[in-house]
Image (cartoon, rainbow, N blue to C red):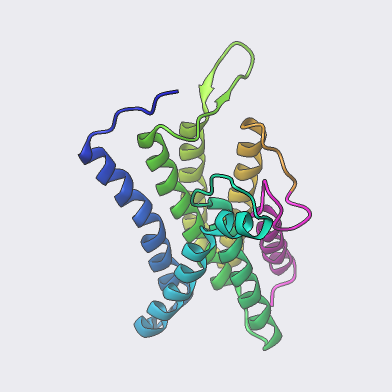
């Protein structure tokens, strides 16, 4: 199969979208996590964003680390699963730490939900431009491309999460986390790469167990507020 032709300008747009996925999501996480009624603590927002970015970008190397560990001569492209898993684990540890000292982690979970959905949206748009990650949905006689469905669903989840933010950050976090997790499960089913996520960090589906744990924390906080 030949690769689709891409002009230099399109290649730069694809690169820009993938850079935006990392930089934009880090900025969103930092700003949401450190904001309150008094405003935003900018130094703390920068630090929080950097921490998120380190785990998110570092996690993209999951396939490389796994290939080296297994001594396998296989292709090891940047891993969305690894980026999500690493950042979700870091967020889980942060949430548990806040709960241990008597603080409500709802804003931390909300920041992660908005950040990971924003990053996914940017990555999926770049995939559409690059012509990668093909899959089709076949409901009866209709045939739909999966990427537009993923993009549209992510935009809906982002809008719902943002709208619920002002009503209840915890409910907003639950909507964003569960929405992204369900979309990833649906995407894997449609691509023929189904995984429940267990055992944790196994491939395919390394991101699913950490996402499920985060979603469970958000659900418990919604039922029994901190």
Which of the 4 image quadrants contains residue 22? bottom left
- Magenta part of the protein: which range? 197-226
Camera-nearest residue between 184 and 158: 184
Residue 166 seen in the figure: no
Residue 107 rendering spot, x and y as whole percentages: 54, 72
Q: Is residue 208 magenta?
A: yes
Residue that appears at 66% across and 31% down: 192
Q: Is residue 170 left or right of residue 161?
A: right
Q: Is residue 7 left or right of residue 119?
A: left
Q: Residue furthest right?
A: 199
Q: Which quadrant does the N terminus fall into? A: top left
Residue 196 rendering spot, x and y as whole percentages: 75, 46
How many marks the image carries: the answer is 0
Residue that appears at 45% across and 68% down: 53
Residue that appears at 65% across and 70% down: 92
The correct choice, above or below, for 119 with respect to 218 in the image is: above
Q: Is residue 224 left or right of residue 50?
A: right
Residue 99 rendering spot, x and y as whole percentages: 68, 81
Which of the 4 image quadrants contains residue 128? top left
Camera-nearest residue between 119 and 70: 70
The correct choice, above or below, for 34 with respect to 156 in the image is: below
Q: Is residue 43 left or right of residue 54?
A: left
Residue 29 rendering spot, x and y as whole percentages: 45, 68
Q: Which quadrant does the C terminus fall into? A: bottom right
Q: Is residue 157 magenta?
A: no
Residue 114 seen in the figure: yes
Q: Residue furthest bottom?
A: 101
């Amino acid at each position: 199969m030949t690769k689709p032709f891409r002009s230099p300008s399109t290649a730069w747009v694809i690169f820009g979208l993938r850079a935006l996925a990392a930089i934009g999501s880090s900025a969103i996480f930092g700003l949401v996590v450190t904001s309150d009624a008094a405003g935003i603590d900018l130094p703390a927002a920068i630090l929080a964003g950097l921490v998120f970015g380190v785990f998110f970008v570092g996690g993209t190397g999951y396939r490389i680390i796994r290939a080296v560990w297994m001594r396998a001569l296989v292709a090891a492209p940047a891993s969305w699963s690894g980026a999500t898993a690493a950042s979700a684990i870091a967020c889980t540890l942060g949430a548990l730490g806040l709960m241990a000292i008597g603080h409500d982690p709802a804003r931390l979970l909300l920041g992660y939900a908005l950040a990971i959905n924003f990053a996914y949206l940017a990555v999926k748009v770049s995939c559409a431009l690059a012509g990668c990650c093909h899959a089709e949905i076949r409901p009866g006689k209709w045939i739909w491309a999966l990427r537009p469905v993923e993009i549209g669903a992510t935009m809906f989840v982002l809008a719902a999460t943002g709208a619920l933010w002002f009503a209840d950050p915890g409910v907003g976090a639950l909507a964003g986390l569960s929405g992204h997790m369900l979309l990833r499960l649906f995407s894997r089913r449609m691509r023929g790469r189904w995984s429940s996520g267990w055992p944790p960090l196994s491939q395919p589906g390394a991101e699913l167990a950490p996402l499920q744990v985060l979603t469970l924390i958000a659900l418990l906080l919604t039922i029994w507020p901190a």
